[in-house]
Image (cartoon, rainbow, N blue to C red):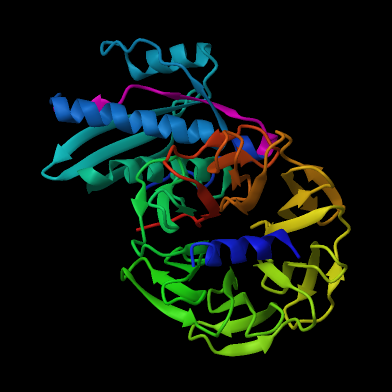
């Protein structure tokens, strides 16, 4: 039996994402290289201590977002002389190699933080983008991420991922509860306080809901948590396994594993829990489905050859075919761009590592090789990063890395073990 099924059984039963002079600035998408961006010290408009503090924080967060995106190199600050004209400062930045310059002025209006930003072409002095942001002071990190995402969009034509979040499971309370955190490891928040087992969370395509399997009522039922209305309800409560799988791209249907007293197979249900179609049928275990972004195909795990392997099928349940792999496979996730599948695989006598299957070429690339277990990967909304579980530190924690396997970093330091992360779409308020 596959590892994912054993994992499900073990955890269930062991503890019983104004204004612009140009639409898209194409210096990155044209060359594929990083752009050198300069960010001047943000000006505190009134000079007050709180304003100075938030001006510094906003700049730091935006810098970190842009560095993480891998689209930019940050050109280090030059000493700012207020007597220097903009032309003189642009000349200094150009000598340091910067191609664009971000300037900003920060002020506080009651309980609101106001930031006026300006992105300039260093060579010409022309404004690329200018905008005023206003939000509650408590939301200063979100405001920073919003600016970062807009800068990425101006350079690439695609929205950045700084406003995305990650949901995962942690057992630091001795029970498995759901937690949510910003993509950069800040603003941790606990979502469930059941003193029960809650596992396998997955985001809806619009980022407003999370489905997960819970043992709240002593059966592994499928729940949905509405983050907007802050309430939850049961979607599927058939006797036996109701293992959260995958939202359809339109968010109207869910593909999940049901056992119903038989072998665990895949079923398609609506948001009311009504079974629309039985997708697989046989005396084997089918689990871990993930929709293609076009909604026409699904990748899943099946042990029909005697050990867990990757399979793809059409949304009507037909045209089932096996992807050529070796070893024991688990937890596939289809890329938002549609061309790749990231998954876990263990070779004989080895550990679980992350791999990417390139669909156009059928080439498989190994992403991790740290002699520890690396599992349960899911994609960032732009398809350029993955978040996953690893016990590289000696205990299970959540990590992020680029899709080429580089830049691995721990998401957050927490007591207990963390499991099964799921990366949200870019979230807007």
* Residue 303 seen in this snapshot: yes
* Apparent side of residue 222 relative to residue 298 in the rendered image (left or right): left
Task: Identify which residue is drawn at 48% across, 54% down.
Answer: 168
* Residue 45 seen in this snapshot: no
- Where residue 76 appears, x then y in whole percent? 46, 16
Total labels: the figure holds: 0
Is residue 36 inside the magenta stretch? yes
Q: Nearer the viewer, residue 361 or 238?
A: 238
* Apparent side of residue 234 relative to residue 7 in the rendered image (left or right): left
Which corner quadrant holds the C terminus?
Answer: bottom left
- Where residue 153 appears, x then y in whole percent? 51, 46
Which residue is farthest left?
A: 110
* Apparent side of residue 298 relative to residue 400 in the rendered image (left or right): right
- Where residue 81 appears, x then y in whole percent? 29, 10
Give the answer, above or below, for where 265 lies relative to 354: below
Q: Nearer the viewer, residue 206 or 213?
A: 213
Instruction: Residue 21: name its quadrant.
Output: top left
Which corner quadrant holds the N terminus?
Answer: bottom right
Is residue 333 inside the magenta stretch? no
Give the answer, above or below, for where 117 lies relative to 146: above
Task: Identify which residue is drawn at 74% across, 35% down.
Answer: 369
Give the answer, above or below, for where 160 lies relative to 295: above
- Where residue 145 appears, x then y in whole percent? 40, 43
Report the magenta residues as a range.
30-46
Q: Nearer the viewer, residue 358 or 134?
A: 358
């Amino acid at each position: 039996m596959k590892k994912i099924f054993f994992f499900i059984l073990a955890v269930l039963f062991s503890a019983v994402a104004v204004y612009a002079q140009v639409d898209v600035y194409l210096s990155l998408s044209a060359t594929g290289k990083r752009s050198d961006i300069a960010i001047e010290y943000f000006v505190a408009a009134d000079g007050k201590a709180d304003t100075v503090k938030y001006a510094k924080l906003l700049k730091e967060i935006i810098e970190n977002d842009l560095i993480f995106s891998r689209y930019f190199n940050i050109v280090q600050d030059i000493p700012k002389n207020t007597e220097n004209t903009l032309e003189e400062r642009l000349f200094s930045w150009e000598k340091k190699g910067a191609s664009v310059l971000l300037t900003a002025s920060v002020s506080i209006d009651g309980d609101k933080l106001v930031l006026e930003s300006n992105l300039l072409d260093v060579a010409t002095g022309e404004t690329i983008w200018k905008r005023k942001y206003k939000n509650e002071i408590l939301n200063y990190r979100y405001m920073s991420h919003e600016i970062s995402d807009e800068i990425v969009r101006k350079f690439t034509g695609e929205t950045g991922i700084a406003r995305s979040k990650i949901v995962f499971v942690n057992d630091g309370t001795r029970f498995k509860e759901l937690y949510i955190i910003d993509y950069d490891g800040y603003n941790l928040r606990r979502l469930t306080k059941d003193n029960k087992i809650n596992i396998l969370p997955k985001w809806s395509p619009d980022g407003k809901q999370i489905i997960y399997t819970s043992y709240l009522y002593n059966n592994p039922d499928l729940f949905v948590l509405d983050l907007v209305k802050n309430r939850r309800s049961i979607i599927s409560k058939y006797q036996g396994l109701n293992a959260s799988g995958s939202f359809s791209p339109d968010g109207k249907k869910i593909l999940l594993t049901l056992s119903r007293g038989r072998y665990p197979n895949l079923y398609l249900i609506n948001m009311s829990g009504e079974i629309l179609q039985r997708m697989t049928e046989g005396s084997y275990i089918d689990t871990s489905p993930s929709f293609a972004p076009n909604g026409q195909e699904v990748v899943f795990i099946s042990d029909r050859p005697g050990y867990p392997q990757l399979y793809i099928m059409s949304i009507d349940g037909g045209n089932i075919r096996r992807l050529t792999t070796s070893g024991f496979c688990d937890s596939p996730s289809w890329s938002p761009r549609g061309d790749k599948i990231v998954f876990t695989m263990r070779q004989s006598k080895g550990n679980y590592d992350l791999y990417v299957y390139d669909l156009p070429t059928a080439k498989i690339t190994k992403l991790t090789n740290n002699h520890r277990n690396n599992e349960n990967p899911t994609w960032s909304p732009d398809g350029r990063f993955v978040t996953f579980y690893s016990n590289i530190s000696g205990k299970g924690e959540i990590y992020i890395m680029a899709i080429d396997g580089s830049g691995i970093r721990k998401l957050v330091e927490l007591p207990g073990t963390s499991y099964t992360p799921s990366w949200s779409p870019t979230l807007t308020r």
